Image: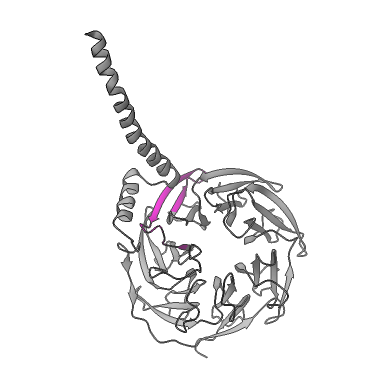
Amino acid sequence: MSRQVRKKRGGWLPIVVLVAILVGIPLIVMQIQSSKSGMTWGQIIDRGKAKLAGETTGLEDVFDVSLPARERIEFLVPQTIGLDIQPDQPRPLVSQTTTVDLDGDGLLDVIVCDIALQRVSWIRQHPRGVFTETLLGDLLDAPARAEPVDIDGDGDLDLAVADLGMLNPNNDPIGSVVLLVNDGNWNFTNRTVLENVARVADIRAGDLDGDGDPDLALAQFGYDDGETRWLRNDGNYSFTSRRLHGLAGPIHCPISDLDGDGDLDIAVLVSQEFEMIYVFRNDGRGEFEVLQVFGSTNEDFGSSSLSVADVDQDGDPDLLYTNGDAFDYLPPRPRPWHGVQYLENEGDMKFTLRRLGDLGGATMARAVDVDRDGDLDVVAVSTFNLWKKPRSQSMVWFENDGSMRFARRDITNDPTHLLTLDLGDFDGDGRIDLVTGGMNFFAPYDRASRVKLWRNVWGD
């Protein structure tokens, strides 16, 4: 009898093991996904339900503040600045254009990261209206962004460079951070302060620990293996690396006091299939709380840029956000949900996403009072659009009607493949001009550009 009981009990063991496997493995996967993404189990389940229900746009719960499109207005005069495209050189792959008065002469210049030429260069304006481009430091593998900052406190601007290692996604530890140190006479020397890490897509400078010197925040895209980290400035070009997050796909990490408590927080845009925006809330001493402030249900949302601007001019910083990345398609093509939006800062790290309008392949946006009527409009550029169609635009602006409703106005589709956009008054007339850079990664190439200055002549 006892042998029969033991035999009967032993018969349950495979069932118990099978149940444990069927239940345990999903729970383990859920926990790994939660720890990687920062989402709760409920958020992961809701996202899975949305995926099973069919293709989503990711805009179902977004507040739409767009108005019908309006006619085009001619107010920008384009001018090629810096090196022009040469037949014997590779097509331009400009990853960043940053406006800054690097030499302190009162005239705006442009810092260019060009992956095709493997260089960070300075388009210097001197005298006004005359632009000359020179290489800064030694060549780099794939410079993604150069951040102007006086990293050594000697009174001149250096450049902190995020180096991808290579443009295409890669899991190898090929990323690095390189300082281009200014000797005071605009001669720059390379100093590598971090290397053999996941591909570094963005770098920003700010005093994150409150000790009076600039630290660095990094977005490391990697591929399947990426992360977010910051580098504490220990002086004498020495840094302590601190990991903040282990999720792959970070592309932008702007720094700002998002909660108004007097210290600098970090906002991070995570692309890949995650399509999320995180805020790392600073306690003032360099310890950070991780908060997810946006997550799309559409794994193909195409997150492409994140910047800080007080779009609604209510005194606190909002987050301006584009989605239009299309590298997942061959050939790259726009999707109907691509466009421009901003996350309105409601206080206490609460943000509401508000859609400004559509733009196929949108890759960067900036808030600027284009028409000088006292409110902020938004200009945006596109890299991935249907360039053979005349109506496909590479640059548009969304006109603010003064009540935070926005109507799209087209600007141009020549040149195509615009990736970067920055702002500044280059000619001293009080109107904000634009600077764009071309990422000519795929055909057609008939309207390619490298760096263009768009002079604002509104009202002339």
| Residue 290 forms part of the magenta stretch | yes
Q: How many numbered discs?
A: 0
Residue at the left extreme of this rendering = 1
Snapshot quadrant of residue 31? top left
Residue at the bottom extreme of this rendering = 460
Note whether residue 203 is visible: no
Snapshot quadrant of residue 202? bottom right
Residue at the top extreme of this rendering = 1
Q: Position of residue 29 (x, y in %)?
A: 40, 40
* For residue 294, side relative to residue 127 (left or right): left
Q: Identify whether 234 is placed above or below 362.
A: above
| Residue 125 forms part of the magenta stretch | no
Q: Quadrant of the N terminus?
A: top left
Magenta range is 278-303
Q: Position of residue 153 (x, y in %)?
A: 69, 54
Q: Identify whether 223 is placed above or below 107.
A: above
* For residue 370, side relative to residue 445 (left or right): left
Q: Nearer the viewer, residue 425 or 361?
A: 361
Which residue is at 39% across, 66% downward?
314
Which residue is at 65% across, 64% downward?
115
Note whether residue 53 is visible: yes
Which residue is at 26% across, 18% downward?
9
Q: Nearer the viewer, residue 110 or 2?
A: 2
Q: Position of residue 84 (x, y in %)?
A: 69, 78
Q: Position of residue 208 (x, y in %)?
A: 55, 49
* For residue 274, side relative to residue 426 (left or right): left
Q: Nearer the viewer, residue 381 or 425?
A: 381
Which residue is at 64% across, 81% downward?
80
Tell me how the rendering is colored: one colour
